[in-house]
Image (cartoon, rainbow, N blue to C red):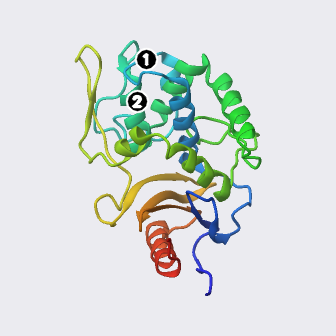
Amino acid sequence: MRDFISVSSHASLVIDAQSETLLHYNEGKERRPIASLTKMMTALMVMESVEDLDEIVTIKKEMLNVEGTVIGCPRSGYCTGTRLQIDEKIRVKDLLKAMLMNSANDSATALAVHIGGTMEDFVDDMNERAQSLGFMDSNFCTPSGLEIDGKECYSTAYDIARIAIRVLEYQEIWEIMNLPPGTTITSVDGKYTHELLNTNALLGDYDGLLGAKTGFTPDAGYCVLAVAQRQGHNIVGVVLDDPYRWRTIQDMFTWTFSSYIWK
């Protein structure tokens, strides 16, 4: 059996979620920026730290001082909806929705500050937790995946795939990832309503897809992590720096399910 060949991605990998057996591997342990795939580690930290996802977060000014995609603005400088407001109170689960569906950087930062006290302390905890789990080729700089000039911000296809395997323990995360575009979240007092997009281009169009998380920065390129289930088995696919990421991830899954049989 020949391995899958990805001609457009800098790194790609498929791993069996149950056994952590590598089914496809291409530069899977090369350290490189992963952009918003970082939010999978942030989500893991949230699920391990917060007992009740209805816990309330009070939005502070420092939570909103971020670049790129934020609630109400699908891309930097282009705002079509209501942004988070200072002193707005909103539930953890709703910030998770914005972070995972919409890839909102302000939501990731708000969760980080709420849990860690400061973004920097949360990131320190992220890196310590990653090391404790054996993710030795990851160094996160922000909870959102935005890079910081002068700092080494990186992970690998292999590490981020294994982070996703840990996140598979939390069904709530995968339910969030499958919410449709147009889903709204509302402040506790009902004063502010925010409409969310979903960056998953395969939502509802790929049989067995459990969820997908996208990422993009100029340094990282176009990235995607996705989990698919067939034959009662979950596989995790990661594509880093690939302008054709959606086609590649589908081709990877198709190749994997046609090449392997689980008994």
Question: Does 241 appear above or below 189?
Answer: below
Report the residue marked by disc 1. 57
* Mark drawn on residue 173: none
SS for dot 1: strand
- Amino acid carrying label 2: it is Leu
**Most extreme residue toward the front, as rendered?**
263
Cβ atoms at labels 1 and 2 below 8 Å apart: yes
What residue is shown at x 36% (from left), y 20% (from top)? Answer: 90
> Residue 184: image x %, image y %?
25, 34
Front residue (pair 69, 36): 36
Residue 239 in the figure: left or right of residue 95: right
Front residue (pair 46, 58): 46
> Residue 215: image x %, image y %?
52, 52
Q: How many marks?
A: 2
> Residue 120: image x %, image y %?
67, 25
Question: Does 134 appear above or below 202?
Answer: above
**Upstream in sequence: badge 1 or badge 2:** 1
- Amino acid carrying label 1: it is Val
Neighbor class of circle 2 (other Cα within 10 Å; few <14, some 14-19, many 20+) is many
Front residue (pair 221, 14): 14
Quarter of the view holding residue 125? top right
Neighbor class of circle 1 (other Cα within 10 Å; few <14, some 14-19, many 20+) is many
Residue 138 in the figure: left or right of residue 214: right
Question: Does 118 appear above or below 128?
Answer: above
What residue is shown at x 55% (from left), y 67% (from top)? Answer: 242
Report the residue marked by disc 2. 95
Q: CA distance from mark 1 to mark 2?
A: 9 Å
What residue is shown at x 44% (from left), y 43% (from top)? Answer: 103
Question: Does 237 appear above or below 251?
Answer: above
What residue is shown at x 71% (from left), y 28% (from top)? Answer: 124
Quarter of the view holding residue 129? top right
